[in-house]
Image: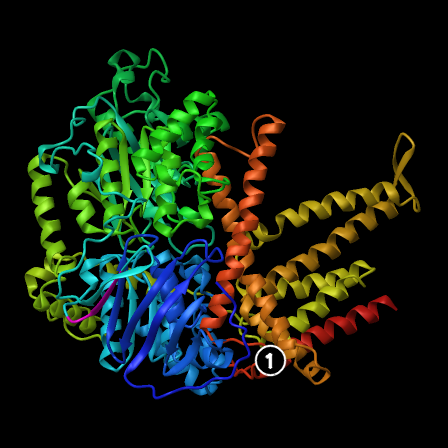
């Protein structure tokens, strides 16, 4: 996007009722060679809802940024919030843009790029702080905004640990806290589950009732009300400007990048109720047995004691609320995570399993044909000549086997098995931009076939086949960064299809796509089913479930987070009917004002804690995802760790810990080390950090200090020799120095870990900025330095996750940076480094837009809603620090 830096003065006429007015607006990304927007003229009146619709790549996101005062066009006239911010005569007007951004809020397509701090409540407070809202009022705005999006229980959470849908709601809350009178939202519900989507829509309804103007970019027809103002774009032109009740051109018509299935003559499979041609397949494609997996330091497992079998050729939908474990299940299946307990097998290949239970090995004899038992992954790998067991003994052994799977630690498959797994399983990730790493779309699609050693002709044939199947053959020579979000998703799918997996996992493949692109992906899934490919579809779209799925896996709240629908045709028919009933009530009522009002009224009542106005039958049929999510959030909130150390003023804590850490280097006697160790152990206890957690944080450093300490044994020559090894003598002074060295550095690293563990990065940077604030009198940009540090702490993990995703995407398609010949490893490493630079630039660009949207400016006089005060605990901590310094000095005398 272009920078808004023209110094021309602002002149305004009467504002009228038009909050947004564009006249003959043009915008180009390539200096006028092509036009992303061409001749756009439209009006958005105060208090109305304007829905921007159209095919992927039609210019909706570009137009939304112009309407949110985040970009300037190349030509035309733009009036925002009653101010002329751009005209052909004067160009861009920076002061007018700044004033407009105070009244217009923006929510981006990817919420992770809009979150600028490491704590939810601090992120919501960032905008009001930039607007100099009084500190006392900011707290109320945080509470109200998070309540509006049902995220009040997560206010102290780290946004980077939230699911995509939860991050989306936090981003919306950040704009609500700024009391923006106009909201421009770029597909804010794309990654939300159905109930969460209704809550967001109900929130927008309430805001509109209070006079807020809404501009909504959407692909969902059910989000368009009959009274809404609808603007449809096609190749940068407005092709429709009317209301939701008027006839509207077909979405995606004429878009060559995403053609509908009927335009290609692609085959369509038989209906769901007629069953799958693979129902009689002799063996399962995927089997989970008592699988449990939890992320490090999580209060509860992401999935707990999961058991399911998926047969070859089935299409299975994985559904559930945001954060319920669907993506975790997909990652376990793709071999990107290893479960703590349980067994996973794919096409007979054991991906993860514990050591075999001795009792389980006695269940059956080899002559009983155990190798033919499809429920056992080990085949003939059983003791020969085992005595036959009685039914009672067999039942006991089965129970012992199940208990063993639940409790025994699982082992990760070896490198060879993982490579074979990646040959069989294709994984389309949730964020397609992280899965594209080559210069062109064709090169990216060719990466997998090349990694598997195919010849040049075979690689070319695979690339053409996959691009044609995805309907993007005309994009083969385009750079992935030039594509729209929907086109990037289709390119990522094509790259996986080129590997011809037997099991395909697709995580939200149609999120953010227009109707034509969704139909294209649906047709791809049907065609893969005819070819015998097993498809696991992570989705929030109930229409996709009823249309494509043979069975459902429903994720919910622990400890039993799993349910599978019976797969008999009669039960599938009833399942489809129930889904369609819920679908009609929750997802297909767009053209019925009564249905729409019922949906919104129900969501608004539930969000406000009022009784559910929906009929009992509807409440019974509708899945209660939000109640599960709220219960999980509340549980994690009440279990939040609180300690004496975490409650300290971060300024006092930072200074105190730094003094303690530096004082450790002055410890030259064991008595001084003992004093430092006692203080360090006391602070660990006062921080309530589990020793195992602390050890995980510091064990690598301790190993390094051990090696460095041992070197001192051979360097120090003074003292009494204890052992002589060749020309080297190990003396008592050398041993003492080595142990003293390791002890001092261990104290330093433990203290540093305690400080970082009990202080959020945002609090650390706030403390840093506060301590540097006196330097502002010397024209030192203390506030900007603190912000840069905060953003670095926020986005370094994001870039790390980006690199990890690229490496994982390569691994899933046969590439690896840690295996193969040196040339192959170098090529794989280059395929990581180059897109990492591109990702860093992309994040930097999006970050600048996020700061603009939150009204941040250099030298701004900001308020701070967190007021730090030195209390009795801080004084006591300072006394402990002073006492240690005095003790060390006295012991050195």
Q: Residue at x 33, y 60 (%)?
A: 60
Please state if 95 lies on the left or on the right of 281 as rendered.
right
848 in the magenta segment: no
Outermost residue to the front: 89
Residue 882: x and y, percent? 73, 76
How dense is the environment of label 1, judged by Cα within 10 Å: few (below 14), some, or many (20 and up)? few
Please state if 519 lies on the left or on the right of 444 as rendered.
left
Q: Nearer the viewer, residue 226 or 876?
A: 226
Q: Quadrant of residue 343?
A: top left
Q: Which residue is mark 1?
A: 859
Q: Nearer the viewer, residue 654 or 461?
A: 461
Residue 83: x and y, percent? 40, 82
**Span highlighted in magenta in the image:** 227-232
| Whether residue 533 is situated above or below residue 7 in the rendered picture | above
Regarding residue 452, the answer to whether it shows in the image is yes
Q: Residue at x 13, y 65 (%)?
A: 246
Residue 626: x and y, percent? 25, 62
Prevalent SS, magenta region: strand
Regarding residue 170, the answer to whether it shows in the image is no
Q: Residue at x 70, y 78 (%)?
A: 780
Disc 1 element: loop
Q: Please identify the quadrant where the C terminus is shown.
A: bottom right
Q: Nearer the viewer, residue 812 or 615?
A: 812
Number of dots carrying numbers: 1
Q: Nearer the viewer, residue 825 or 512?
A: 512
Residue 243: x and y, percent? 17, 68
Q: Quadrant of residue 457?
A: top left
231 in the magenta segment: yes
């Amino acid at each position: 996007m272009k920078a808004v830096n023209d110094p021309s003065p602002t002149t305004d006429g009467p504002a009228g009722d038009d909050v947004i007015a564009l006249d003959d607006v043009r915008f180009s990304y390539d200096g006028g060679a092509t036009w992303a927007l061409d001749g756009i003229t439209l009006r958005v009146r105060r208090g109305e809802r304007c829905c921007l619709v159209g095919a992927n790549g039609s210019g909706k996101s570009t137009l939304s940024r112009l309407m949110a005062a985040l970009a300037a066009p190349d030509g035309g006239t733009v009036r925002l919030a009653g101010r002329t911010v751009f005209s052909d005569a004067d160009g861009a007007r920076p002061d007018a843009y700044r004033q407009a951004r105070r009244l217009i809020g923006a929510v981006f397509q990817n919420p992770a790029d809009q979150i600028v701090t490491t704590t939810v409540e601090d992120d919501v407070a960032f905008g009001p702080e930039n607007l100099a809202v009084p500190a006392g009022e900011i707290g109320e705005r945080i509470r109200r905004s998070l309540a509006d999006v049902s995220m009040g229980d997560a206010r102290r959470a780290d946004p980077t640990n939230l699911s995509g849908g939860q991050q989306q709601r936090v981003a919306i809350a950040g704009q609500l806290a700024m009391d923006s009178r106009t909201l421009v939202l770029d597909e804010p519900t794309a990654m939300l589950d159905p109930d969460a989507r209704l809550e967001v829509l109900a929130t927008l309804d309430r805001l509109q009732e209070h006079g807020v103007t809404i501009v909504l970019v959407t692909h969902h027809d059910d989000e368009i009300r009959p009274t809404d103002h609808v603007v449809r774009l096609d190749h940068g032109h407005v092709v429709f400007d009317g209301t939701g009740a008027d006839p509207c051109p077909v979405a995606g018509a004429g878009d060559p990048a995403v053609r509908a299935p009927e335009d290609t003559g692609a085959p369509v499979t038989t209906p769901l109720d007629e069953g799958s041609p693979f129902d009689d397949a002799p063996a399962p494609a995927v089997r989970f047995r008592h699988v449990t997996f939890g992320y490090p330091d999580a209060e509860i497992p992401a999935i707990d004691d999961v058991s399911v079998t998926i047969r070859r050729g089935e299409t299975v939908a994985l559904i559930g609320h945001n954060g319920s474990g669907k993506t975790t299940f997909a990652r376990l299946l793709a071999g990107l995570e290893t479960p703590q307990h349980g067994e996973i097998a794919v096409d007979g290949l054991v991906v993860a399993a514990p050591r075999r239970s001795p009792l389980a090995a006695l269940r059956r004899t080899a002559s009983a044909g155990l190798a033919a038992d499809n429920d056992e992954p080990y085949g003939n790998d059983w003791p020969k000549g085992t005595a036959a067991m009685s039914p009672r003994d067999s039942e006991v052994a089965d129970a012992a086997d199940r208990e063993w799977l639940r409790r025994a630690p699982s082992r990760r498959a070896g490198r060879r098995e993982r490579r074979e797994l990646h040959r069989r399983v294709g994984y389309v990730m949730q964020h397609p931009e992280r899965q594209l790493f080559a210069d062109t779309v064709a090169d990216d699609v060719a990466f997998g076939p090349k990694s598997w050693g195919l010849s040049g002709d075979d690689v070319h044939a695979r690339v053409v086949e996959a691009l044609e199947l995805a309907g993007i053959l005309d994009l083969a020579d385009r750079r992935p960064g030039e594509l729209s979000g929907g086109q990037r998703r289709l390119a990522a799918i094509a790259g996986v299809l080129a590997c011809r997996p037997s099991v395909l996992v697709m995580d939200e493949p149609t999120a953010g796509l227009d109707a034509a692109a969704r139909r294209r992906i649906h047709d791809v899934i049907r065609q893969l089913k005819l070819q015998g490919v097993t498809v696991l579809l992570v989705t929030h779209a109930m229409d996709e479930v009823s249309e494509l799925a043979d069975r459902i896996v429903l994720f919910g709240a622990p400890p039993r987070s799993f349910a599978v629908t019976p797969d008999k045709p009669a039960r599938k028919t009833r399942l489809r009917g129930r889904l369609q009933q819920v679908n009609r009530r929750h997802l297909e009522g767009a053209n019925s004002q009564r249905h729409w009002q019922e949906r919104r009224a129900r969501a608004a009542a539930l969000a406000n804690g009022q009784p559910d106005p929906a009929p009992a039958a509807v409440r019974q049929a509708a899945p209660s995802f939000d109640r599960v999510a709220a219960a999980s959030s509340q549980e994690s909130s009440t279990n939040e760790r609180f300690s004496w150390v975490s409650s300290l003023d971060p300024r006092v804590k930072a200074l105190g810990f730094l003094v303690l850490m530096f004082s450790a280097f002055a410890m030259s006697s064991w008595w001084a080390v003992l004093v430092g160790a006692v203080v360090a152990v006391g602070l660990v206890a006062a921080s309530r950090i589990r020793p195992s957690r602390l050890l995980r944080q510091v064990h690598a450093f301790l190993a390094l200090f051990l090696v460095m300490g041992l070197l001192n044994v051979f360097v120090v020559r003074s003292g009494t020799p204890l052992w002589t090894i060749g020309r080297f003598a190990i003396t008592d002074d050398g041993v003492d120095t080595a142990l003293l060295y390791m002890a001092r550095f261990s104290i330093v690293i433990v203290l540093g870990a305690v400080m970082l563990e009990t202080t959020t990065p945002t609090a650390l940077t706030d403390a840093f900025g506060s301590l540097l604030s006196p330097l502002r009198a010397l024209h030192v940009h203390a506030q900007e330095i603190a912000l840069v540090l905060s953003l670095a702490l926020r986005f370094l993990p994001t870039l790390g996750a980006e690199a990890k995703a690229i490496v994982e995407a390569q691994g899933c398609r046969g590439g690896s940076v840690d295996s193969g010949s040196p040339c192959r490893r170098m090529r794989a490493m280059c395929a990581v480094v180059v897109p990492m630079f591109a990702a860093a630039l992309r994040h930097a660009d999006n970050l600048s837009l996020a700061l603009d949207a939150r009204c941040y400016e250099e030298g701004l006089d900001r308020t701070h809603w967190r007021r730090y005060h030195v209390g009795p605990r801080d004084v006591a901590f300072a006394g402990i620090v002073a006492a240690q310094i005095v003790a060390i000095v006295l012991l050195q005398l």
